[in-house]
Amino acid sequence: MPQGEKQVLTTTLHRYSRYRKYLLTIMQYFGEIFIIILFVFTSYASLQKGALKVQFQSPSVPLLHYNATVREFYNGDIAIPFYSVLQSDVSLVLYYAPWDFDSQLAVQDFEKIAKKYKGQIFCTSINCWVNSGSCKKTFPKLRSFPLILGYVGANRGVQYRGPSQFEYLDNFVQSLLTPLVRIETVAELNKLLIQSTAVITGFFNFDLAKPNGFYPFYTASLRYLEYDSRKTVVFAIITNPSAAQRLGINLVKPHQFDLRLHMWNETLIYPYNENSIDTSHLLQWIYYRSHSPMQFISPNGRKNQMIQHHLIEQQRPSLILFTSSARPSYQTMVVKEVAFSYHNCVSSPRITKLVQESEIHRDAMEFSRLEFARQCGISEKIKCLSNNISANSHQPSEDDVSNEENCEFSYEPVLPKLEGLGCRTNRTLNFFVIDSHQYPNLLTNLGFSSKRIHQSNNIVFVVDPKAESYYVMTLPLTRQNLQNFVINYTENRLRRFHRSRQEKQKTKKYCHAGRVCIEEISADDFAKIVLDPLHDAVVLFKKKGCVFCEIGVRFLLKLSQMFSSPTSSFLKRNHVRQIKFVTIDAEENVLPWQHTVDKFPTIIFYPAHRKHDSRIYPHNLELNEANLLNFTLSQLSLKNRIIWFTRFCQDTSCLQEAQRQIDAQVVVIDRNIRRSRNHLLWPENSDWMSVAKIQNYVKERHFFKELGYSVRKAVVGIPGENKPDEYRDGIVLLT
């Protein structure tokens, strides 16, 4: 390189390195300046006082109209309404959130309660979702809405835990107004026992200005409503000393008192020391000691395990009455009478008397209802108003018996097999009552449609979790029918209820000619379609949420397309019936025991003329198109198997295997013909049945000969190079 050029290059490189060093220095300074600015802004933000800026709630608006009976505090204020609560004898407070759907429904029924008890109780509603309101600050952990509390004077609030419908709220308000019931005779006590689960009685010395033990007893009657919103346990006060003596109550000292828990089969005396009552201990004693052969179940739907505990975990069968009434009715009393007799193991006179008085009270109640209906013009079919059962007699009179056919009422004696049956069997029933209108999903899951639920207000089920079955009473709910139903269940004479449900599909509309569809059947169609003796059937049992079931349906659809691809002339020419491919939702449709499955998906083949020889697709075998085709072909009759096999053959080796099987079958038929002809050589064996058998053998031989001829013709027609086999190594002729 010349010296001049070398000097120019050296100068250029030196200048480039100087510029590069200058740029790196500037970038370093810029990085430090940026870090300093970021630090300043961060420090400034951290030194700022006050909370972060958030978006405020939209202004609260009233949930009720302006002229509502309920005083509404939609701004979340709690001081003003509670001042009115303290000034009122009985108050009802609804805490709600305006966005909550249950709160919006509860407010409507809450207003109806306020209108009914206007002037008796103070009703108010408070929006407890406003952040700036005092209610939100006072109850910050309140996360469930709506919340209803009842206040009696200055006592602690009683939380209502039942449904927020009007009928249930009405019962709760009546319990707040009259938490104690006054009884003066033993007959009134028995009447309360009939209408409730248990009765706890208190006998106090009211000659004193402050009877010892009365106020804790009164407080317990209010607080127990939190456990028992339906008031199935009644708190009563005995005011008649003679009635107390008849019950065995004798007070020695003036400051003494007596508390007793009366139930259907026993009476317990509350143990107390030093003549004092601990309210919490008394509530626990009542809660754990009270029992009844029939219970009301009221699941609240918020992760409640009540149904799981009563019906599943106990592993005992249960008789359930689904009724539309929240109050004791004719139907609930019928179930209660049967439960009393069912558990009367020692023929107790006390239980027998309760059953008789319950029957009299039930008939009198039904008579009053029908009389009221007749007077209102609702029903005029009752003509025997004066010849009915007397409400004061325990036994039917001659006039009653003679008018049984004309009247709606008749005495139904306890069957000998029923009394004490619960102690003579290992399948002892529990008796429960559930409101069908409040919890219709329970009936829907058992297989009843909404239309059927509205048509029948009272439905009786027996659910047996151990046997995984349930039974329904189809006859009207009467004492005699219910007794027979319980006895028939105990003696295994009932047929299990088969739930049948099929989703509405538009299969017929879209499955026109040229389109292959699989029919989804219900339990009602199972016998007609699957168990048809003239057709082979392949059924896929599935359930909702099963991913592999959907994959199995696709393979079944492909298989259905393969077996339906031949024309109808092919089936008629070879005397082959079409194979039925169907699916069924085994979770929504309950089938007989012999057709139930325990795994999903499950594919079962039901052969024609021998449904008892059904076969299950092996669960350890991969579910794919080729395996499913091999399984279906292997379960067909020999004749149909060879016919379909030759239809699916696409190469020479496959057709040659089919020809070998056909020749082997012809050899078997020839052997049978010779055997039958030799049998006819003896005079005593010459009958028309043997001749007909030979004729059938000849027809079969002719058929297989023609089939073998067509197969050989197809083999000859195949060119030298094999055609592409769609099911290569997938179709095997199984014997």
Image (cartoon, rainbow, N blue to C red):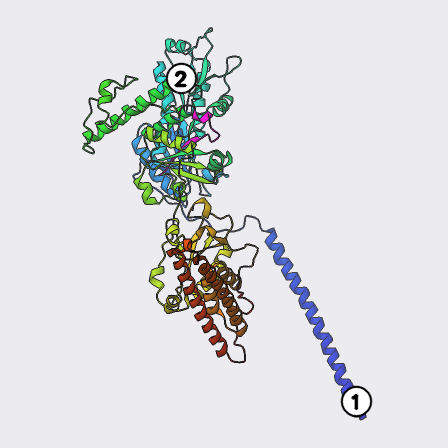
| As drawn, 236 above or below 589 | above
User: Which residue ends up furthest to the top in the rendered image?
Assistant: 252
Asked whether 121 or 282 is in front, the reply is: 282
Label 2 belongs to which residue? 350
- Residue 624 in percent (x, y) is at 53, 62
Residue 128 covered by magenta stretch: no
- Residue 258 in percent (x, y) is at 45, 13
Upstream in the sequence, badge 2 or badge 1?
1
| As drawn, 713 above or below 615 | below
Spatial distance from mark 2 to mark 1, Cα to Cα?
A: 129 Å
Element assignment for label 2? helix
Boundaries of the magenta span: 418-436
Element assignment for label 1? helix
Local crowd at mark 2 within 10 Å, few (<14), some, or many (≥20)?
few
User: Foreground mark, 2 or 1?
Assistant: 2
Which image quadrant: the N terminus?
A: bottom right
Identify which amino acid the numbered label 1 is placed on: Lys
Label 1 belongs to which residue? 6
Residue 319 visible to an observer of this rendering: yes
Identify which amino acid the numbered label 2 is placed on: Arg
Asked whether 681 or 438 is in front, the reply is: 681
